[in-house]
Image (cartoon, rainbow, N blue to C red):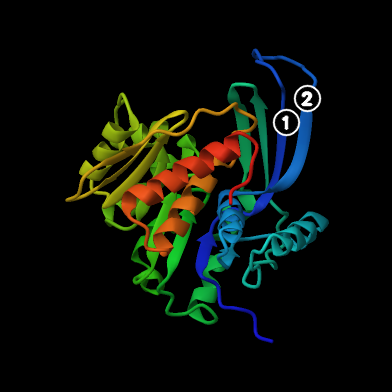
Amino acid sequence: MTEKHPDILCIGAMLWDVIGRAPRRMAQGADVPGRIQHIPGGVALNVAVALARWGLTPAVLSAVGCDPEGEALTAQANRLGVRTDWLSRDTGLPTDCYMGIEDSEGLIAAIADAHSLEAAGDTILAPLADALANWTGPVVLDGNLTEDLLARMSRDPRLANADLRVVPASPGKAERLEPLIAARRGCFYLNRLEAEILAGRAYPDAASAAQAVVARGAARVLVTDGPHSAADAMANGPTLVVTPPRVTVARVTGAGDCFLAAHLAAELQNQPREAALRQAVEAAAAHVSGKDVP
């Protein structure tokens, strides 16, 4: 039996997350008891896993080592409903890793080691020339890709008809998205700090930050702001705002990826903009509270 063709391509980081969580506030240099998890992660894979929970069939294009970590990661992704048929596995590089520390208030610090993905470069895009040629569906791009590769992808004829959904991965990588903004390609999913970096100044809320990035040339921008209202701004259209429900913080890492997946799933079902934004906000809040949605 032939496997179903993927609905969505998620291009970027697929790695292991090592997340330490403490149940109370932590000061710099603190050494406290808590829990440490070793779970599949990376923006591209996180979004793909969340999309699979919405009943979609995502595939990841990334670089994953042939080491034991890579074998285990690929097997786990498959179990979670993600297609891994087109991964770049023969780079001779180790599987990447992310390490984060969270306390009761959220993320304290994190380090993303995506050097293998960066070194693999455009080899991860090889399937777009054969097995996945003439792609016209949604493509999620994450900021763990290098700025040079993102710039080339903004002009890549293999993605000319794709619906690009772009996420920076972290504030430190937000500026990598500049070529896509300049090319007026893609719908951007940002937190307020990332939007402020791209806009070049601070803003009081998600709506004004989203509008500022649209004013810089982006066609559409969605901005989250933790427990505060999220916004969806677009050129030549109204800016929408939805306030998330209040929840107790159980985890933070991956909330933005759940937001993107829920929003994209809603739009693929042709839901109106406000309904899609509300579904995204509620899914992110549920993730932060420790639940998985749907």
Depth check: give the residue in front, 215 or 113.
215
Residue 107 as seen in the image, left or right of residue 256: right
Query: In this figure, which residue is indicated by the disc labeled 1?
Result: 20
Residue 52 in view (yes/no):
yes
**266 versus 56 height, above or below:** above
- Residue 34 is marked as 2
Depth check: give the residue in front, 116 or 79.
79
Q: CA distance from mark 1 to mark 2?
A: 7 Å
**78 versus 195 height, above or below:** below
Look at the image and tell me in which quarter the N terminus lies: bottom right
Residue 34 as seen in the image, left or right of residue 224: right
**Residue farthest to the bottom, as pictured:** 1
Q: Residue at x 51, y 65 (%)?
A: 9
Q: Locate residue 197, reporting x and y percent.
A: 36, 33
Q: Are marks 1 and 2 in contact (CB under 8 Å)?
A: yes
Q: Residue at x 34, y 54 (%)?
A: 180
- Tell me where residue 72 sits by quadrant: bottom right
Depth check: give the residue in front, 6 or 241.
241
Residue 142 in view (yes/no):
no
